[in-house]
Image: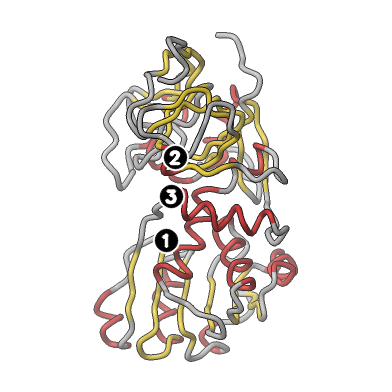
């Protein structure tokens, strides 16, 4: 590593078996040297997302050999650089995702794939930056890479007040799309404030009674909501889900394309987000900041065993507890 013979040892949240939050163990661990295309990040903040809970419980869509360190969204400072890394130097402030397995982020020092990081915008702190990567890139890719939406087209966004949905609304607004969104009564005003053209209170109105011939549906809810969405799309439209695989028989019946996708975080995808942040065009929503040693509590929030805040949960890793 370009940091000479310096080695890094710090605390991590590791699991040795899949299960509930109590399988999470706080351990002291040596960080391996970065390989080609990797850097070591001194983590200042780590985001907590539902996928962390899926990995912990053994329900990830990706292979997850044990033992593993949980966490993927990180923001911090580059402290070591592996071979073939040219875009980052020691001391750079960065944010992004650790690796394609979405693990290794709940750590004082995290090994990260350099091509899944970007320079942190100066206008936001590490907590805000750590809240962004997976959810913001998921929203962008759903709208543009998957649905292929263009200025002037109309999109229906389900779950618009959620972590992914809130970014989808804002990206759609910035791209000149027309948006119809569904939200609970408590969230209607917030979604309007994010820039939606029309917000439907799903507790009072069935969206299919008010929406017709949209170009795309971004499904962040699944279940019956997804099934009912087929009928509001124009022929040739796109139903894009980040939560479950759509019914292909229904897709054929309605002559639309329907697919589930997994987010692909890259420097390029993060750079689009960074640019909008630099322009002051995005509102971020950190729902709770917890101390690093409270990671189990964060997962209890994911499980609904502790009150779950609206917005992203972030672990602040600047100060580390003693074992």
Percent across and percent down for residue 298 are 57, 35
Q: Nearer the viewer, residue 159 or 1?
A: 1
Mark 3 — residue?
266
Q: How many marks?
A: 3
Per the model, the C-alpha gap separating discs 2 and 1 is 16 Å
Percent across and percent down for residue 150 are 50, 80
Q: Which of 268 and 235 is in front in this view?
A: 268
Mark 2 — residue?
53
**Up/down of 123 relative to 158, above or below:** above
**Up/down of 11 relative to 160, above or below:** above
Badge number at residue 242: 1
Q: From the viewer's perspective, is 46 left or right of 191? A: left
The quarter of the image holding the N terminus is top left
Cβ atoms at labels 2 and 1 below 8 Å apart: no
Of the residues tagged 2 and 3, which is closer to the observer? 3
**Up/down of 152 relative to 320, above or below:** below
Per the model, the C-alpha gap separating discs 2 and 3 is 22 Å
């Amino acid at each position: 590593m370009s940091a000479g013979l310096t080695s890094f040892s710090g605390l991590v949240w590791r699991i040795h078996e899949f299960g509930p939050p109590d399988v999470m163990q706080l351990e002291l661990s040596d960080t391996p040297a970065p390989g080609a295309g990797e850097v070591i990040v001194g983590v200042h903040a780590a985001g907590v997302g539902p996928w962390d809970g899926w990995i912990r419980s053994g329900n990830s869509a990706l292979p997850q050999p044990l033992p593993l360190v949980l966490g993927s969204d990180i923001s911090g400072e580059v402290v070591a650089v592996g071979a073939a890394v040219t875009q980052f130097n020691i001391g750079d402030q960065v944010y992004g995702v650790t690796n394609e397995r979405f693990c290794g982020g709940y750590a004082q020092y995290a090994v990260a794939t350099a091509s899944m990081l970007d320079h942190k915008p100066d206008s936001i702190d590490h907590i805000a930056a750590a809240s962004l990567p997976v959810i913001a890139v998921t929203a962008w890719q759903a709208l543009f890479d998957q649905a292929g939406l263009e200025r002037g087209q109309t999109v229906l966004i389900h779950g618009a007040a959620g972590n992914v949905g809130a970014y989808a609304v804002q990206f759609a607004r910035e791209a000149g799309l027309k948006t119809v969104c569904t939200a609970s009564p408590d969230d209607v005003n917030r979604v309007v404030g994010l820039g939606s053209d029309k917000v439907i209170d799903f507790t009072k109105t069935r969206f299919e009674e008010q929406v017709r011939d949209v170009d795309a549906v971004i499904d962040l809810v699944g279940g019956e909501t997804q099934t009912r969405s087929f009928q509001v799309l124009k022929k040739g439209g796109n139903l894009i889900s980040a939560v479950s695989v759509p019914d292909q028989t229904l897709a054929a019946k309605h002559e639309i394309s329907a697919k589930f996708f997994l987010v692909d975080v890259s420097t390029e995808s993060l750079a689009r987000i960074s640019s909008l942040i630099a322009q002051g065009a995005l509102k971020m929503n950190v729902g709770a900041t917890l101390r690093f040693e409270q990671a189990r509590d964060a997962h209890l929030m994911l499980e609904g065993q502790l009150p779950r805040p609206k917005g992203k949960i972030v672990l602040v890793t600047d100060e580390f507890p003693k074992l």
